[in-house]
Amino acid sequence: MAILVTGGTGFIGSNFVLTWAKNTDEQVINLDKLTYAANPLTMVPLEGKPNYTFVHGDICDAALLQKVFAAHHPRAVVHFAAESHVDRSITGPEAFLRTNITGTYELLQAARTFYDGLKGDEREAFRFLHVSTDEVYGTLAPADPAFHENTPYAPNSPYAASKAASDHIVRAWHHTFGLPVLTTNCSNNYGPNQFPEKLIPLMIHNGLSGRPLPVYGDGLQVRDWLFVEDHCSAIRTVLEKGRLGETYNIGGCNQRTNMDVVKALCSLLDELAPDTNGESHSRLITHVTDRPGHDRRYAIDATKIETELEWKPAETFETGLRKTVQWYLDHQDWVHTITSGEYKRWIEQNYENRA
Ligand code: NAD
Ligand code: TYD
């Protein structure tokens, strides 16, 4: 038995694969292109583990995908691989359309060919789980109800549009070709192994180095935050018990403004890594030019997964954030391997021209 994970060296995929390989004997195959977002240090704990196989490759490569399915005969695909950063989708949308749309299409085609050759119990058990985002639903006004599975799609950023397209393609491959798919739409994740271009690890990294903490616009945008391990447990639950063709919203019921998040991080840094000068990290908070098309509020109604599949998150925002800050403090070597070269260029490009 084996599962095929795409993008398993990235933030959420690596948390999923590390937990999977630790807690089961089942083979996990990680197919990853190793883009800038993948840190080679992340998978070091799995080196030499007999139930872990790494395949370096691109989900747009149809011939490679065919070989991987034939060689490993997976019982399930868990599809994380994507370009995932909204700001990068604004400065360079093409990679998002390629990986998130064409890549998902190629993966579905390879899965479909493989599935068509299966018989009996193997065919009955096969699953294709597509990992997606709440950003496909667009933005909410302060009093709007949270996103539920029937909220109309209204993606606003190139990232969200590319994920929305991939969700629709996955849906069509179920309805037209009978591929046994499941889709999850999750809110903002945080936790270990997140690349420090996203809000929480960027603020921790900048705070520790005494650099400005760049808050876009007024900082009153709202996100629903979920600890990454809770997202992984939800994915395992959907894989095991989800109804074919259904979508499941996943969220932490933790709506916070960006300012709330940054202030909470400053308090944790003040406690766990106090500045030698005795000043609070909050002195570093700097409002900068807003993101174009910035979605104002996301909120998730997770009633369906909670009632139908009996999933609930284990962490509160406070416990998860503390664990996250502690993880970054304990893994400064992990951060330092990626905060040179390409990362420096990105930071210059994204922040230099913000007033
Ligand atoms: P990430 O950017 O940290 O990691 C993406 C991984 O995919 C990297 O390891 C990268 O090397 C790999 N990859 C990129 N292009 C590839 C290609 N063409 N072929 C093979 N591998 C490729 O992303 P993440 O934050 O871990 O997100 C994983 C998935 O979860 C994405 O599909 C994203 O849309 C979704 N999601 C993320 C969040 C979040 O808050 N981060 C929330 C909801 C959903
Ligand atoms: P991000 O982590 O990029 O996730 P997403 O855009 O997918 O929600 O950003 C989270 C929020 O934080 C979002 O409202 C943008 C904001 N933000 C900042 O204010 N400053 C920053 O430097 C970054 C990276 C994000």
Image (cartoon, grey):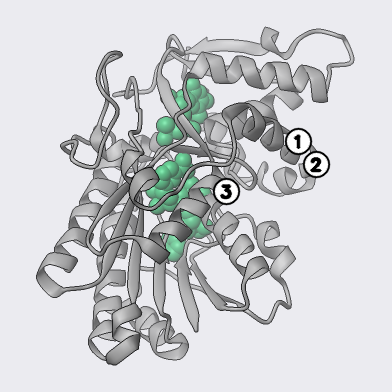
User: What's the residue at 65%, 67% (across, down)?
Assistant: 23
Residue 113: image location, x then y, percent: 25, 84
Displayed quadrant of residue 317:
top right
For disc 2, does the CB lie below 8 Å from ligand 1?
no
Q: Does any portion of residue 116 appear in the rendered image?
A: yes
Q: Secondary structure at mark 3?
A: helix
* Residue type, numbered disc 1: Gln
Per the rendering, the mark at residue 326 is 1
Residue 226: image location, x then y, percent: 50, 37
Q: Looking at the picture, tell me which residue is in the foreground, 92 or 279.
A: 279
User: What's the residue at 70%, 23% (across, down)?
Assistant: 207
Residue, disc 2: 330
User: What's the residue at 51%, 10% (across, down)?
Assistant: 287
Per the rendering, the mark at residue 234 is none
Residue 139: image location, x then y, percent: 27, 26
Check if mark 1's residue and mark 2's residue have beta carbons within 8 Å: yes
Residue 247 falls left or right of residue 171: right
For disc 1, does the CB lie below 8 Å from ligand 2?
no
For marks 2 and 3 on the same chain, the one whose residue lies earlier in the sequence: 3
Q: Residue furthest left?
A: 176
Badge 3 crowding class, 10 Å Cα cut-off, few under 14, some 14 to 19, many 20 or more, is many
Q: Looking at the picture, tell me which residue is in the foreground, 109 or 250.
A: 250
Residue 259 falls left or right of residue 285: left
